Amino acid sequence: MIGDKLFSKFSKEMGIDLGTSSTLVYVKDKGIVINEPSVVAVNTRTNQILTVGTDAKKMVGKTPDHIQAVRPLVEGVISDFEVTEKMLKYFIEKVHKESFSLLARPVVIIGIPLEVTEVERKAVEDAALSAGASRVYLIEEPMAAAIGARLPVQESVANLVVDIGGGTTNIAVISLSGIVTWKSMRLAGDELNRSIINYVRENFNLLLGEKTAEEIKIKIGSAMPLDEHTDMKVRGRDLITGLPKEISVSDMQIREALTRSIRVMVENIKTVIENTPPELVADIYERGITLTGGGALLKGLDRVIARETQVPVVIADDPLTCVVRGTGILLEDKKLMEDILINDTQGQNIKS
């Protein structure tokens, strides 16, 4: 224990939003220090990590056979343990590079989706411990997002949070430091990208890359008609000739591509509300729904959800960083941490 306390003086307590699309790292007393894509470039001949994050994302779809740009998390869970471990190690070492990195074994809080199995939880814990963490605490992403959005999670009122990430959408009603009703679905930003790819392939015989589909979604994607019609030129491979081709797509066409996925999302939000105790439903009607995560930035999504549920909807400030800011607030507020997180992965009480 004395050794642990000695090491902790040289270490940094960290909160990590280990997302399918991006990984964000919060360091106690410093704030968010890393916000990079969850992509790792691997040389398959030597089994070496070439680069991680932003530089690796630039390689997606452009690598030779012996280099793979890998996303080690799929739909919010680890699909490649070894690569995830190396990615976490890279980020932890990047945070500690100006301090005593040989001694640094940080305490880490990691946000995870709601619907994960014990095996998947253990994979996250083991990856973080292998990457150099001394202790690992896990927190459900919607709970972390609610804390990051400064919602009163400890009070006896309902906080309905819809956290739309890259791989998963987590919907949860939170009250008295716990999750009352919830639903997790593997339909989020990546699925919206795939919807765009499928629509363009079926209607224009053009094959797009994921990166291009994401650019389309961000620039002209919407859930409701925009004030002004916009078009965007996109390039891909013609499925008939096999040659490069450029077409123009409109916001109306992209909205049509996204309609089905958005409808499924709205139906799941309704289901959670229907399964919520009446007293809490009354709170939701009064207090509204809070949207967090990158998917909350889709134009008009808040208005569609409000129209369909008859409940006011607000988008959290800086929704992309809500989860990691929530882990940061826990690191700064030990009392709140004790209420939300009871034991760490080694079964030791937080107070110890």
Image: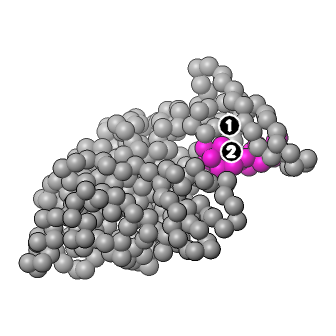
Q: Earlier in the sequence, mark 2 or mark 1?
A: 2
Q: Which residue is mark 2?
A: 196
Residue pictured at 34% horizontal, 47% vertical? 322
Residue that extends furthest to the top in the rendered view of this protein: 228
Quarter residue 204 falls in:
top right
- Pinpoint residue 327: horizontal percent, then vertical percent: 28, 55
* Whether residue 10 can be seen here: yes
Relative side of 149 to 154, left or right: right
Q: Which residue is mark 1?
A: 254
* Whether residue 139 can be seen here: no
Relative side of 37 to 325, left or right: right
- Magenta-colored stretch includes residue 73: no
Q: Which residues are magenta?
A: 192-214
Query: Label 2 is placed on what type of residue?
Result: Ile
Q: Is residue 330 above or below residue 226?
A: below
Asked if labels 1 and 2 touch by Cβ distance under 8 angstroms, the answer is yes
- Pinpoint residue 87: horizontal percent, then vertical percent: 44, 64
Q: Nearer the viewer, residue 277 or 89?
A: 89
